[in-house]
Image (tube, helix red, strand yellow):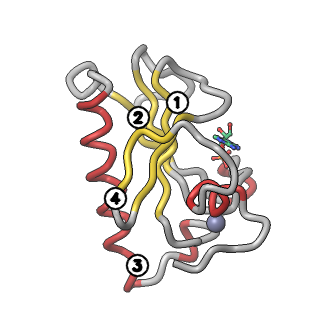
Amino acid sequence: MSAQVDCIFCKIIDRKIPANIVYETDSVLAFHDIQPVAPVHILIIPKTHIPTMNDVKESELPLIADIHRAAQEIAKQFGIADSGYRLVNNCNRDGGQVVYHIHYHLLGGELIGGLRAL
Ligand code: AMP
Ligand code: ZN
């Protein structure tokens, strides 16, 4: 689990900067977003430093499954499994990515707007 120097999320994984952690396994960490845009706004990250979705290797695909498992568990933990939620990964500039360590936003607790129904 190689930490990237200057990566804010690697620093959270290494407990070098604080975060409000809500879920942790050997492969995944989840914590409250510092600037929430919904009543429930949790970030779920792999403990491996992967800059973007484009960089996920075949061997790392199980980490993506682990993140989805974490989302299931956290949604239950926060009581939003039945009311529903959105799980979002932003990739690169046009996707609105700001932190270049893969993360999924788990958003819920109210009707999440901003995207048309697909
Ligand atoms: P993105 O635009 O998908 O890269 O989202 C990055 C997210 O990380 C934003 O929603 C930020 O509010 C959040 N964020 C940045 N720094 C921290 C931090 N130290 N602790 C928790 N969330 C953070
Ligand atoms: Zn990182």
Q: Are marks 4 and 1 in contact (CB under 8 Å)?
A: no
Where is residue 109? Give x, y as percent. Answer: 40, 17
The residue pinned by badge 3 equals 60
Q: Are marks 2 and 4 in contact (CB under 8 Å)?
A: no
Report, in whole angstroms, how far the alpha carbon at label 3 lies from the one at label 1.
Answer: 29 Å
Q: Is residue 56 left or right of residue 81?
A: right
Quarter of image, res 27? bottom left
Tag 3 secondary structure: helix
Which quarter of the figure has residue 29?
Answer: bottom left
111 and 19: which is toward the camera: 19
What quarter of the picture does the C terminus occupy? top left
Q: Which mark is first along the chain, 1 or 2?
A: 2
Residue type highlighted by circle 1: Leu
Residue found at x 41% / y 34% = 86
How many dots with numbers?
Answer: 4
Residue 78, compared with residue 89, is above or below; it is above
Q: Residue at x 27, y 30 (%)?
A: 77
Disc number for residue 25? 4
The answer to which of marks 2 and 4 sits earlier in the sequence is 4
Which is nearer the N-term, disc 3 or disc 4? 4
Numbered disc in front, either 2 or 4: 4
Q: Which residue is mark 1?
A: 115
